[in-house]
Amino acid sequence: MRGPLRIGVNALYMIPGGVGGTEIYLRGLLTAMAEIDRLNQYFVFTNQETGADLVPKAPNFSAAPQPVRAAFRPARILWEQTGLPLNAARRRLDVMLNPGFTAPILCGCPQVTAFHDLQHKRHPEYFRWFDLPFWEFFLFWSAHVSRLLLADSDATAADLLRYYRLPESKVRVAPLGVDPVFFDLARRRRPERFLLAVSTLHPHKNLDGLLRAFAAFRRQRPEFRLVVCGMHGFFAGPLHGLRDSLGLGDAVDFPGWIPREDLHELYTKAWAFIYPSLFEGFGLPVLEALAASVPAACSAIEPLSSIAGTAALQFDPLDQNAMVEAMLRITGDEPLRQRLSEAGPRRAAHFSWRATAEATLAAMTRASTPV
């Protein structure tokens, strides 16, 4: 009978506060994995920036610090392709989990790799010219050398099959979860007059469209402010400039990536939530807003439409008038606000990190089975 698995977790990409939603994913996944699996042995390969709190304090979880800084991407990639496989062999791993898109091309054990989206294929125009070749090369090979792939949503799974011409049996969907703390926030909400958007400042998030729509919205509801909370990506400069050119300097805040406790406080105080993205692999902030009972409006795109269902107001993200109308309704239509507030937690309850962890463990167990 086969004994416990020796599982590696490739967390070399993880920079606290510097990788956006993939950090939330990794923390939620590892916490849930430690809750459901006390049998298998986990080795979490960390970098020099990773905080000690990433690795669960469970007897079957061990940190495996690596001598590399993820902030210097070339060094991180080089170590992932050379040092990490050597460490995997030294620890006699049965399977390697890569939760951040990329995998060692040559590795002595089977691999399971998580793909959160294929934005570089769907929207290469949103990438800087010097970043795109990296995404093209390493994600292509990671998809093909891994025994199984995990997709956050049906939409991402379909993209994997379409762009990489993979067999359907190689791709599994493991939807993301929501931290139970967000359901607790719903019981202590004290709304103040501001709209909350939680998003990295990247072009595909359509925050420039949001700023223009918010400027029009403010002409009817001047008492409202907008807080856009998330990592300052390479589109931050243009967004700050647009905010000032629209005369919104005192009405729009970009606080950047903030501690989760501070973000929780914003959810308790937000009058409503707005998410105007043009492309998503999942859309975790929408799910968090629903769980926190914040009246929400989001883009009518997949996978957001499937995640939110009727628990959020949906709009065409390319139609400024539609976005303005959505903001007016989620701030002023009290029957609608009440309905969305009640429907949000019910909808969010369908998603849990435990389910994500169970699907991930099943994939790792399958991948480690000799073919």
Image (cartoon, rainbow, N blue to C red):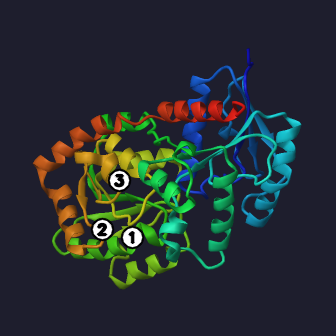
Q: Of tags 1 and 3, which is closer to the observer? A: 3
Q: Secondary structure at mark 1?
A: loop
- In front: 220, or 126? 126
Query: For the residues marked 2 and 1, what is the alpha-carbon distance in whole angstroms?
Result: 8 Å
Query: For the residues marked 2 and 3, what is the alpha-carbon distance in whole angstroms?
Result: 12 Å
**Image quadrant in which you'd find residue 135:** bottom right
- Residue type, numbered disc 3: Leu
Q: Which mark is residue 317?
A: 2
Q: Label 3: which residue?
A: 304
Q: Does residue 150 sit above or below 164 in this rendering? A: above
Q: Which mark is residue 206?
A: 1
N-terminal of the pair, mark 2 or mark 3, is 3
Q: Are marks 2 and 1 in contact (CB under 8 Å)?
A: yes
- In front: 237, or 88? 88
**Residue 322 rendering spot, x and y as whole percentages:** 20, 68
Category of crowding for the residue at label 3, using alpha-carbon neighbours closer than 10 angstroms: few (below 14), some (14–19), many (at least 20): many
- The residue at the far bottom in this view is 245
- At horizontal 28% and vertical 71% (from top left) the residue drawn is 214
- At horizontal 68% and vertical 68% (from top left) the residue drawn is 134
- Residue type, numbered disc 1: Asn
Residue 72 visible (yes or no): no
